[in-house]
């Protein structure tokens, strides 16, 4: 069976994270610059090989001062670790349109295995004759596992930033000729 290559379409994709602030509310951020690709056997995605990376300097939480703090040494240290990357080790169908994507996430110079839940939205042709495939990806990491250990506590004893970070992405791939 022939190998099919798919390129991530950044104009129809988004990558976000959510983290609790003061334990009472959620701050949402996104990465504005990212790229990725998938390699499949034929047109089925089971067993696909997936690679993804995001530019840490493209972080956007809708608040410039917070973004600069996140890019700095207290958090991501974008000057030293400019990229977050993911390389899959397995992509398994668990039923219907649901998959598990497992691989190695590298963040802040630390590589750890992670598993994401994936919902496959299907394939469709666009106005230009291109075949597109859509996916919603969700998961959770503990930021301290990746050396993101900055911690603040308010005078009242509230934790400023939670350890758990929810990751989500809506990804569209374009089949390459």
Image: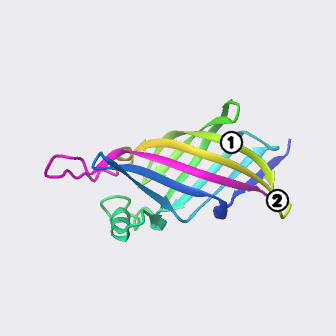
Specify the farthest residue to the top. 95
Specify the farthest residue to the front. 24
Q: Could you say where residue 174 lies in the image, as x and y percent from the top left?
A: 75, 57
Left or right of 79? Residue 89 is right
Label 2 sits on a secondary structure element that is: loop
Q: Residue at x 48, y 51 (%)?
A: 106
Specify the farthest residue to the bottom. 64
Q: Is residue 23 above or below residue 11?
A: above
Q: Residues within 10 Å of mark 1 (few under 14, many from 20)?
A: some
Q: Which mark is residue 154?
A: none
Location of residue 118 by image quarter = top right
Label 1 sits on a secondary structure element that is: strand
Q: Could you say where residue 3 lies in the image, as x and y percent from the top left?
A: 80, 47
Left or right of 176? Residue 71 is left
Q: Could you say where residue 30 lies in the image, as x and y percent from the top left?
A: 49, 59
Total number of numbered discs in the rendering: 2
Is 3 inside the magenta-drawn segment? no
Residue at the spot of label 1: 120
Q: Earlier in the sequence, mark 1 or mark 2?
A: 1
Magenta residues, as a range? 148-177
Residue at the spot of label 2: 130
Q: Residue at x 65, y 64 (%)?
A: 11
Q: Residue at x 43, y 50 (%)?
A: 18
Q: Residues within 10 Å of mark 2 (few under 14, many from 20)?
A: few
């Amino acid at each position: 069976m022939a190998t099919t290559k798919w390129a991530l379409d950044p104009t129809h994709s988004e990558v976000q994270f959510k983290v609790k602030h003061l334990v009472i509310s959620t701050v949402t951020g996104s990465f504005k610059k990212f790229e990725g690709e998938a390699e499949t056997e034929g047109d089925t995605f089971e067993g696909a090989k997936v690679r993804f990376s995001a530019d840490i300097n493209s972080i956007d939480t809708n608040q410039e001062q917070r973004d600069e703090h996140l890019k700095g040494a207290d958090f991501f240290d974008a000057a030293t670790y400019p990229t977050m990357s993911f390389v899959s080790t397995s992509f398994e169908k668990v039923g219907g349109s649901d998959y598990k994507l497992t691989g190695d996430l590298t963040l802040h110079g630390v590589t750890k295995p992670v598993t994401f839940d994936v919902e496959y939205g299907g394939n469709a042709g666009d106005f230009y004759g291109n075949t597109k495939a859509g996916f919603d990806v969700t998961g959770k990491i503990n930021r301290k596992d990746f050396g993101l250990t900055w911690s603040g506590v308010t005078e009242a004893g509230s934790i400023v930033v939670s350890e758990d970070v929810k990751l989500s992405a809506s990804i569209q791939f374009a089949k390459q000729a």
